[in-house]
Image (spheres, rainbow, N blue to C red):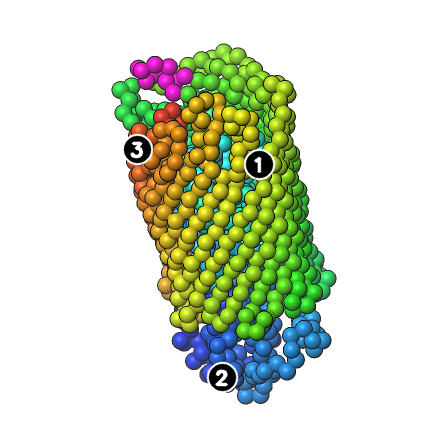
Amino acid sequence: MFTQASLRPLAISAAAAALFGASLPALAQQTAQATQSTQRDARIDYRIAPSDLNTALNRFAEASGVQLAYASSLVAGKQSPGFTGRADAAGALTQVLRGTGLRAVRGQNAAFVLEVDPEPPGTDANVAAETSLPAMTIRAQSEADAHDPTVAGAALKSSTPLTRTPQSVSIIERKQMDEQNVQSVAQALRYSAGIVPETRGIGDRYDSLQMRGFGGFGGNAVYVNFLDGLNLGRGLSYAVPQIEQYGLQRIEVLRGPSSILYGQANPGGVVVLESKRPEADHVNEVMLGAGTHNRWEGAFDLGGAVDADKRVLYRFVGLARDADTQVSGTKEQRIYVAPSLTLRPDANTEFTLLASYQYDPNNGYYGFLPRYGTVSYNPNGQIGTGFNDGEPDYDHFRREQASIGYAFTHRFNDVFTVRQNARYTHMWSDYQTVYSSGYTNSSNRYLNRLTTASLEHLDALSTDTQLEADFNTGPVRHAVLMGLDYQMTMSDRRLSSGKAPSLDITDPIYGQSLTAPKLASYTRQRTDDLGLYVQDQMTIGKWSFVLGAREDYASTSANEYVKHTSSYQFDRAFTWRAGVLYAFDNGISPFASFSRSFQPVTSGTTADGSSLKPSTGRQFEVGVKYQIPGTTSFTTLSLYDLQQTNVSTPDPNNANYRVQTGAVKSRGVELETHLNITRDLSLIAAYSYTSAYVASANDSSLGHTPAAVPKNTASLWADYTLHRGTFKGLGMGAGVRYIGSTYGAADDSFKVGSFTLVDLALHYEMRNWRFALNASNLFDRQYVAACASATQCFWGVRREVIGTARYQW
């Protein structure tokens, strides 16, 4: 498993604070006054979740062992932003008290005494107090966001506790990814509600998924394509970036339409990835791994502070992997490096430079097989899960992607903060393959095969500039976010196609003579999307309100040089959302929201030659969140009604053209919980019920459930790790995943059976070493992950076992 060592002490201190809250204050009271000075000066790891101020102060005292003295009336009704990171007691307490109007002064009988801050926020005295803690103000905020599982950074583009966010959000921490030893972003989403990842089964060169019933295959596929708040872009066909999971700090899943902040987006939701960034007190690691299918890999994660004041930080992450796959004649290979550098010239400014390079010389299998022989009975026998319908000596997929960008933040004062994120990405892909297209005849023995070849390039530029204003109007606290984002992609594709000899599924003969595919199209395309958005987060006591609006201007121009055609399309869309939440003192937070989304339709025209309008989405969502006070244990229950309109369907009068009378509706219930039951035992559970159907269409899909959308999914993951005793450091994790039956074609003509998979993890930590053994699909279940049609079915991943050893210092 991949484990970021810097999370280990954070997790231990968090669990200790949350689960032994009754005993630690008693221990603190028994501490002699002579030790208070030492405890005040010691730098330790804190993990204090946002909560009411009294709870946050108790957790601070428990973690630090430092005594506090204050009148209960001083903290009544106040909220603390919490603090996650390494600091001395004074620095941590400063962050816990931030925005409360209180300050801490050194006492005699107690380490600190709380009192009303006589200096209003933003005065010179306060600025001096903050800058006297070098690199603390900014660092505490950024590193807290990166490690706190109850604070979302992507949902509202600000650090907002989940208990104040009126939207269904899941956060997947680095710790969870390491425990489960995920090998891709799609695998990291296995235990999240509302998501069906890995619908392509063993074809994992892209991170495609279904969210709340929306997704698909081919041109309709939905990919994970937001990194550090910016769109990655994608090419015309196969030039789709894939982000190496080892380079990520966390993943945020935003369910439902999110166009208000992210522009063009799938109505089911978006997945936002966050890169690993420099940290002042980083723990270094090197890792070696080996496993099934001759898998070998090595990785490193190095970083820390360059100077004593910790104003210059660096991080360097890298990985190399070489493996076969369960499909004969295929391999997966990857080289990945990601350097980053952070500059903090003062307490209010931070600039982080982020770069990455990834090369995939071989990217595994991405084919499919017919229904008969996989899902349904075939008198010639079942097609094996390792069967290759292509040509091992001919097929290849190579991809290279590189990016460079930055994240800049400057706080002018306690009111105004400006942020700008930017990234440039370049990638190319070289793909050629022989693939099956059903059987040649009704005997269901010989596969009809075709060839395709695609050489693509993609250049993408994304920027997002934000101005945030935090102020009060009477009893209302505002966090107003105004932003301008711009995305540009330039892509070209040379696409060739042809025919290939048939293949006998009972006695496949590879190496037959192939005719080179002929050039079918050569296309160059440019897309531009400019978005203006404004959002106001309003807090009135326990009430939270969110109002937001956005105007998008999107254009697409394309030239096709084989058919000598050109096209231009301009779209304009207005989207908005509103949400309300009430946070009770007991940790319960009911919420409701309405949101809209849009997505341009770039393929096809109407009979009169007009471009198609963007498809639009709208969602009503209600739910309730519960965070056990003083802990990071969190549960979300949500109900939603989601609809996509302006869906393109065939013109009933001319099949060569499209009309926009289509609509897809999805209603469902989702439950997800993350619990720290004891210091040793943690639990993740999720359940989703999805009722999706095509509400309007001109073809056979009308009234049917889209392919690969299960009504029921459920998952459970538990990890038990001993933190004391003879076997301290020994742990075990186990998980169960259930995916309900799905339809295998748009007309619901056949079903793909449900399946249940079991995962297992064993791990042991001693001194600087961590050893782990992970098994995915432990009982080696053979299953079909999904089908897109009667000729396109995808075998699921068989049992994989991977062992890792890492050294941390």
C-alpha distance separating marks 2 and 3: 63 Å
Picture coordinates of residue 613, whole percent (x, y): 53, 36
Closer to the N terminus: mark 3 or mark 1?
1
Picture coordinates of residue 281, whole percent (x, y): 61, 61
Picture coordinates of residue 429, whole percent (x, y): 59, 30
Q: Can you tell which quarter of the image residue 509 is in?
A: top left
Would you say the residues marked 3 and 1 are in contact, meaning their CB atoms lie under 8 Å apart?
A: no
Q: Amino acid at mark 3?
A: Lys
Closer to the N terminus: mark 2 or mark 3?
2
Identify the residue at horizontal 60%, vertical 58% (top origin).
481
Q: Amino acid at mark 1?
A: Arg
Q: Can residue 156 be spotted in the picture?
A: yes
Q: Nearer the viewer, residue 513 or 374?
A: 374
Residue 234 is marked as 1
| Residue, disc 2 | 73
C-alpha distance separating marks 2 and 1: 56 Å
The magenta region covers 438-448
